[in-house]
Image (cartoon, rainbow, N blue to C red):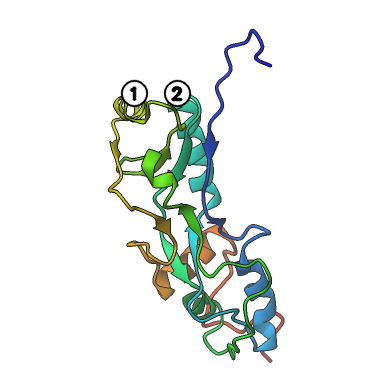
């Protein structure tokens, strides 16, 4: 039931927040001292966003939302093997297999989302599905200065055009997760005598 208040709802959808509880980064940092970083699948990829970037995305969405949008930032991907190399270059990296329900790649915009997705320089915007799709795309496109994505577009971490290198991953970990981290220093729990 609709109330008498002027309320707008929009959503922000983004990938793994670097260093968060759902991220593999803290797990790898903890496991580094064992000399073994288990890899679920060598082709696995994930999107990457820092906490600060996630907060900035939410603030932009609050500032410009018409209501009903799903905002998806353009962010880089990384390969799980590059992440393991960045954290533990000296570690063994056995492939242990994908767990039930785990995906090989993250997909933030599906093929069916494509029909109602706009793009700007910094993000994608999935607009509400209505009976007049063209008018809705035009309304939201004009408001956000955005254009429709190409037919058949999908936004997947495995098909991304922006990739983090091993050295970029190390720098991001140092800046946003653990300022004492260094791939050249002894692993966590190790001590030099």
Label ID, residue 66: 2
Residue 167 or 165: which is nearer the viewer?
A: 165
Tell me what residue is drawn at x 51 percent, y 49 percent: 14
Does 56 appear above or below 15? above
Name the element at disc 2.
loop
Tell me what residue is drawn at x 41 percent, y 68 percent: 168
Residue 23 or 159: which is nearer the viewer?
A: 159
Cα distance in 3D space between marks 1 and 2: 10 Å
Q: Quadrant of the N terminus?
A: top right
In this orientation, does residue 191 appear?
A: no
Tell me what residue is drawn at x 60 percent, y 79 percent: 40
Q: Quadrant of the C terminus?
A: bottom right
Which residue is identified by label 1?
Answer: 139
Does 191 appear above or below 60? below
Tell me what residue is drawn at x 29 percent, y 25 percent: 142
The residue furthest top is 4
Tell me whether the residue at label 1 lies in contact with that at label 2, contact meaning CB atoms closer than 8 angstroms: yes
Does 37 appear above or below 63? below
The quadrant where residue 29 appears: bottom right
Label ID, residue 68: none
Q: Position of residue 188 (x, y in %)?
A: 67, 79
User: On the picture, is 41 further left or further right than 65?
Assistant: right
Residue 55 or 104: which is nearer the viewer?
A: 104
User: On the picture, is 5 further left or further right than 76?
Assistant: right
Q: Position of residue 83 (x, y in %)?
A: 51, 74
- Nearer the viewer's eye, disc 1 or disc 2? 1
The number of numbered discs placed on residues in the rendered structure image is 2
Q: Position of residue 124 (x, y in %)?
A: 39, 43
């Amino acid at each position: 039931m609709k109330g008498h208040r002027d309320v707008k709802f929009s959503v922000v959808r983004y990938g793994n927040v670097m260093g968060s509880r759902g991220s593999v980064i803290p797990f790898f940092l903890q496991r580094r001292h064992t000399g073994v970083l288990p890899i679920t699948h060598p082709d696995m990829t994930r999107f990457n966003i820092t906490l600060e970037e996630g907060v900035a995305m939410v603030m932009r969405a609050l500032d410009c939302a018409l209501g009903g949008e799903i905002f998806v930032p353009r962010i880089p991907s990384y390969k799980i093997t590059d992440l393991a190399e960045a954290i533990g270059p000296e570690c063994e990296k056995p492939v242990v297999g994908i767990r039930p329900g785990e995906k090989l790649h993250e997909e933030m915009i599906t093929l069916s989302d494509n029909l109602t997705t706009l793009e700007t320089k910094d993000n994608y915007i999935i607009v509400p599905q209505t009976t007049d799709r063209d008018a809705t795309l035009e309304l939201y496109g004009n408001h956000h200065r955005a254009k429709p994505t190409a037919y058949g577009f999908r936004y997947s971490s495995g098909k991304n055009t922006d990739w983090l290198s091993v050295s970029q991953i190390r720098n991001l970990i140092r800046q946003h997760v653990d300022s004492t981290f260094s791939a050249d220093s002894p692993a966590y729990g190790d001590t030099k005598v």
